[in-house]
Amino acid sequence: MNRPGQPPKQVDGCIRYFPSPQVAPGQPVLFFFHGDRVEPGGLADGSLRQQMAQAQRIEQRSGMPTISVARPGVYGSTVLNHRYQRRTHEEVAVVSAAIDQIKARYGFDRISLAGQSGGGFLALAMVVSGRTDIDAVAASGAPSAVRGRASLLRSNPATDISTGQDWRNVYDPMDHIADARPDARRKLYLIANRDDQRIPYASVLAFVNAATRGNLPVVLLDGATGGGRQHHNHSRLAQRVIQWHRMGLDDEQIARKVAEGAE
């Protein structure tokens, strides 16, 4: 039995993933992580055909061969209970191990990551957990400061408000900024909407400020608009940001496109 806050030494199960048509050994690749799937209708797009089609659409938006990863507990992936064990040390460890396995299978070297909401959390967690093989990250609507977000949504939350997990089990990127390895080639984009009803903007700023103090360069793209009724879903924008980065656009040009609503 693992102690609270400790990643698993060994896990049994599998992580399902869906490659787009252009994924090939040795080629640049984007790993995409979807958001939480705990609300009614959240698994409506769970068939193999739908997931493969989504990977192809992401490939078109990002301009990169794409592997869409089914997070633990959903879309055929096992290992953890998605409702109660997401945003834990275990989820971060399992997903990182899955990336290693997929990389070895295809012969990938460096990779890019994009994610929305809980998937953006995972993309961000891969950086602050110390991986050294990441070229670019675009995380949208991500709970980058998990406890900070909780305290802004509720007064003195005793456990994680999304999963009910003891705080010792929760992986909070804010706690691991110092674990990020320096990498001049890596670019980290954090996409935020000031009206996001799920991720308070103050919690995003808290992470960005802490990252700046910790010498972890972060580009805050806070001009995102839209995102549905809760101004939260910017998964397409995250994919576009990866494309713009690959095209060689600088930070100001990308920020301008984000502000223009070019999703």
Image (spheres, rainbow, N blue to C red):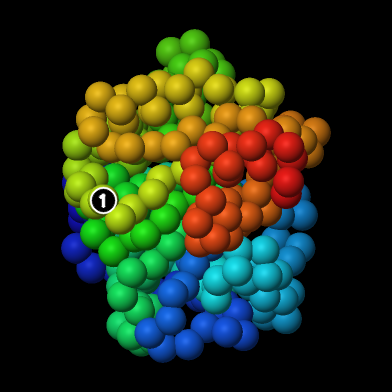
Residue at 49 percent across and 45 percent down: it is 250
Q: Which quadrant holds residue 128?
A: top left
Residue 195, located in which quarter of the rendered image?
Answer: top right
Q: Nearer the viewer, residue 104 or 22?
A: 22
Q: Position of residue 56 (x, y in %)?
A: 67, 75
Asked whether the viewer can see residue 90, the reply is no
Give the amino acid at mark 1.
Answer: Ala
**Picture residue at 58% right of the left edge, 37% below the top:** 255
**Of the pair 133 and 166, the residue shown nearer to us:** 133
Give the structural element (helix, strand or loop) at label 1. loop
Relative to 40, 202 lies left or right: left
The outermost residue toward the top is 155
At which x and y percent is residue 164?
A: 46, 35
The N terminus is located in which quarter?
Answer: bottom left
Label 1, residues with CA under 10 Å away: few <14, some 14-19, many ≥20: few
Q: How many marks?
A: 1
Instruction: Tell me: 53 left or right of 241.
Output: right
Residue matched to label 1: 184
Left or right, residue 88 beside residue 244: left
Image location of residue 241, percent across then percent down: 57, 51
Answer above or below: position of 54 versus 140: below
